[in-house]
Image (cartoon, rainbow, N blue to C red):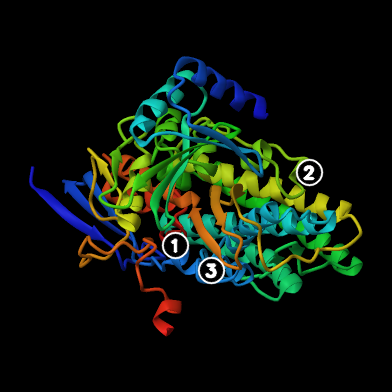
Amino acid sequence: MMKEVRAVIEKMKALYPNWIQDIRELPLQDIVIRVAAADVHEITDWLLKNSNYYHLSTITGLDNGEQIEIYYHFWDGNGLSLHTMLPRELPSMNTITDLIPGASFYEREVFEMLGVKFEDLDDSRRLLMADDWDGQYFPLRSDTKDSPKEEQK
Amino acid sequence: MTRFKVPIGPQHSLLKEPLSFLLTLEGEKVVESVLRMGYVHRGIERLSQTRSYIQNVHLFERVCGICSHIHTTTFCMGVEALSGITVPPRGQYLRTFFCELERIHSHLLWLGVLAKNTGFDTIFMFSWRDREIVMDLMEELSGGRVSHAANVIGGVRVDINDSQRKRMTQNLKSLSQKIDSLQGVVEHETSFQVRTRNVGTLTARQIRQYCVVGPIARASNVDVDMRRDAPYGAYDKLAFSVITRPEGDVWARTMLRIQEAQESLKMCLQILDELPPGDVAVPAKRRVPPGEVICRTEAPRGELLYYIRSDGSENPARVKVRTPTLTALATLPDQLGNVNMADVSVVVSGVDLCIACADR
């Protein structure tokens, strides 16, 4: 099963050697490739046209304290994830909703939870946060102090 | 023509959980719908970072009030993969047994909700009555009707003895006949067909664009099922077929879910028949080695994804949950385009919404 993912990655490597910065394998047979944030749109476009990867499971955002990490989890019977890093100050990247309309909810969620701005997102209405949210407070940022544990201190 | 705006929700008798639609009507037709969620956003992902892995099993059980077991299954699978634990075969079988019981109960519950919203209260009464067989069974095994707390990291905490096995086999066989009769009604009753045929139709192309998963995708002829594509638990040892239908409307989803419930029943009977002897769980350490894992399972509503990252401490560094309902919600504006106001309830209940799941 993993052979097919490897084949896609090899093909990608041969055509665009600059895209892939690092490859790592996770337990439960998932492959994660490290890419630059600026390349994500192009790589997604290439995947849609040249492989069976049409299904974007979700976009995961996380703040490790130094950088914001974004994962794009693709699936075609095998898992392939794109992993990219963004700075914590004013993080922004291109939307992929023009390629995958289903990514809209995921991108809006990542914005509301972590403050990552997706350029040209067609629908930037509020999704999860309250109506009186100021747009400054991002719940999943590592320095956001509002969890019950921190309040007790 | 004058346009009217009709708000549905956050509190509305059509919806069992808070969600809001702002529908724009032109006469009787819906021309635009705006969706707003987040009314039951409980911040579970953030909360999980302040809890230990053992506490988190109980936390993730509360993501959903219908498919609670599959959430703990997925979380435990991920943590087990990170820790390098192998669950003993009996534990795997029992875990899968609960997954399938939950699927039957979820599909029957949904059938009742749909029937109620189409004005077919008889099916609602019958399907919820039949669902009690499964609920009783799960209660007997775990002590809980909805929150079973059956999973622990390393296996399950429940076991079945021989007399229970015999009785359960009997009960499940009687349920099979009851579901058969429900299927007969859905298949042949004209008034039900008039309400659900060609309503809320999604094409395979739309399904792919919106990355929709589970029964909705399969009812539009997109053949995806995590139980077959990426077997977990005991699914690689069970015989089952993945059902697809070409129509893509609410009626097809109804038929598909009833047939799926029948498949699940067969799997449950096979599990009861072939249950291997041995332990149900192995002990697990409190600390999980650093690493990350992406875990996918088939919840009653489709592919469920957990991304877990461990930094080597007792608490996870990040857990991301993507529930299948979120993908279905994205299609609602498309499905609601150009339907009659009277059909809105059928379309909305046809996608099997679980708002608490989607909001987390």
Q: What separation in Å lies between label 1 and label 3 (alpha carbons)?
A: 9 Å
Specify the quadrant that holds the N terminus of chain B. Answer: top left
The image shows residue B219 at horizontal and vertical percentages of 52, 37
Q: Secondary structure at mark 2?
A: loop
Q: Numbered disc 3: what chain?
A: B
Q: Identify whether B14 is placed above or below B235.
A: below
Closer to the camera in the image, B79 or B65: B79
Task: Report the residue that reaches farthest toward the top.
Answer: A15
Task: Report the residue that reaches farthest toward the front.
Answer: A66
The image shows residue B168 at horizontal and vertical percentages of 81, 63
Q: Which amino acid is tagged 3?
A: Arg
Q: Secondary structure at mark 3?
A: loop
Q: Secondary structure at mark 1?
A: loop
Q: Which amino acid is tagged 1?
A: Arg
Q: Which residue is mark 2?
A: B238
Near mark 2 (Cα within 10 A), the count class, few <14, some 14-19 or many ≥20, is some
Can you tell which quarter of the image residue B17 is in? bottom left
Q: Numbered disc 2: what chain?
A: B
**Residue B360 bears which disc, if any?**
1
Report the label total.
Answer: 3
Q: Residue at x 83, y 56 (%)?
A: B88
Which numbered disc, 1 or 3, marks the residue that appears first in the sequence? 3
Q: Residue at x 48, y 31 (%)?
A: A21
The image shows residue B174 at horizontal and vertical percentages of 76, 58
Can you tell which quarter of the image residue B76 is in? bottom right
Which numbered disc, 3 or 2, marks the residue that appears first in the sequence? 3
Q: What separation in Å lies between label 3 and label 2 (alpha carbons)?
A: 28 Å
Any part of residue B120 in sight: no
Q: Nearer the viewer, mark 3 or mark 2?
A: 3
**Residue B62 bears which disc, if any?**
3
